[in-house]
Amino acid sequence: MTAPDDEHDELDPMEEAWLDGDAEAVEAAARAALERDTADPLARCWLGLAQYLTDQVTAGQATLREGFAALRALHAAAPDEDTRDQLTSTMQAFASHLIDAAAERPTLAPGVAAFILEDLKLEHAPALRVQAEHQAGPGGDVVGATMVLKRALALDANDAETHYLLARLLARLGKRTPALKHLGRAIEHGAGLAAVRELARFEPDFDGLEDDPEFAALVDVLPDDPLLRPLYEALDRGDFAPVLALAASLADRAGQPLDVLYPWRDALELSLDSGAGDEAELVKELEKVQARIDELEDQHAVSAAYARFCGDA
């Protein structure tokens, strides 16, 4: 038995089928690979994943145990650190596939996390996060869940979702300072991945912090620029008439025109959707705004203010 490598041709149909969301095709490709090489640990893991997701959970768990046992045997016999790291990454990747798939079937998620952590004996940050979320549910053990999340952060200190969940639980426990620290890290590491500020603004777990100036500063999605802030405030509260008036007056004054053009477009589109104003005039104005946006985007211009407002920065 040899260690898997990135050139392993047998992975192609299994990976492709997995990306297509076709569990039956994953199973068929994995079985075909195992007919050619019964000791192929990767094919056995793919087969286990496919079985797990085609209502063959017991069989899938058994197959995954076999696949992971084979990968661990390879890890123990590996001749160098690079090979060991590759095998560890492979096991982590299969566990992540299982967590991602179970996310679409919420009743499976806690069981999947426990299976990874206890049966496969793999310290896996996403599985720890899922376990903690389940553990901290109604009437659950919030303190114990925070300890599980600290284990997850020991594995991946930059995971925004783990920091965010830990911030929520700490806030629920009344621990203001560490809650704000982890919320800040969630925002820092979640840039471009999740609208952390927007989520936090409406998260009931943070209700006890709503009057806290530091919390308010962390979750503020509006630009500091005094020219832009009233524009975004109006857009945020759904008051589109002031947005249209302000945008028209600010279009030639903003340092980055897209900072104004994006909210202007949003207000025009939402006004049209709601039937407010003269439709023909709104459409005409929207076409002009969109043409200018297209021109600036072709020049690779970006708007940090709008990205922050949307949760992407």
Image (spheres, rainbow, N blue to C red):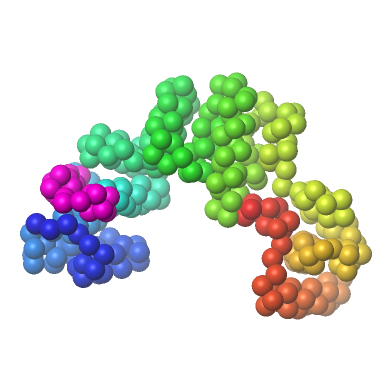
Q: Does residue 104 show up?
A: yes
**Dominant secondary structure, magenta:** helix
The spot of residue 167 in percent (x, y) is 56, 32
Q: Quick check: 11 left or right of 236?
A: left
Q: Quick check: 297 left or right of 8?
A: right
The span shown in magenta is 61-87
Q: Quick check: 208 left or right of 267?
A: left
Total marks placed: 0
Residue at x 68%, y 41% (from the top left corner): 219
Tell me, yes or no, whether the highlighted magenta stretch contains residue 81: yes
**The N terminus is located in which quarter?**
bottom left
Q: Quick check: 217 left or right of 69?
A: right
* Relative vertical location of residue 232 with respect to residue 303 in this rendering, above or below: above
Frontmost residue, 16 versus 225: 225
Tell me, yes or no, whether the highlighted magenta stretch contains residue 243: no
The spot of residue 28 in percent (x, y) is 19, 65
**Quarter of the view holding residue 248:** bottom right
The spot of residue 33 in percent (x, y) is 14, 65
The spot of residue 220 in percent (x, y) is 72, 43
Q: Does residue 69 show up?
A: no
Residue at x 69%, y 65% (from the top left corner): 302
* Relative vertical location of residue 15 with respect to residue 191 in this rendering, above or below: below
Frontmost residue, 286 versus 252: 252
Residue at x 31%, y 48% (from the top left corner): 92
* Relative vertical location of residue 216 with respect to residue 291 in this rendering, above or below: above
Frontmost residue, 279 versus 138: 138
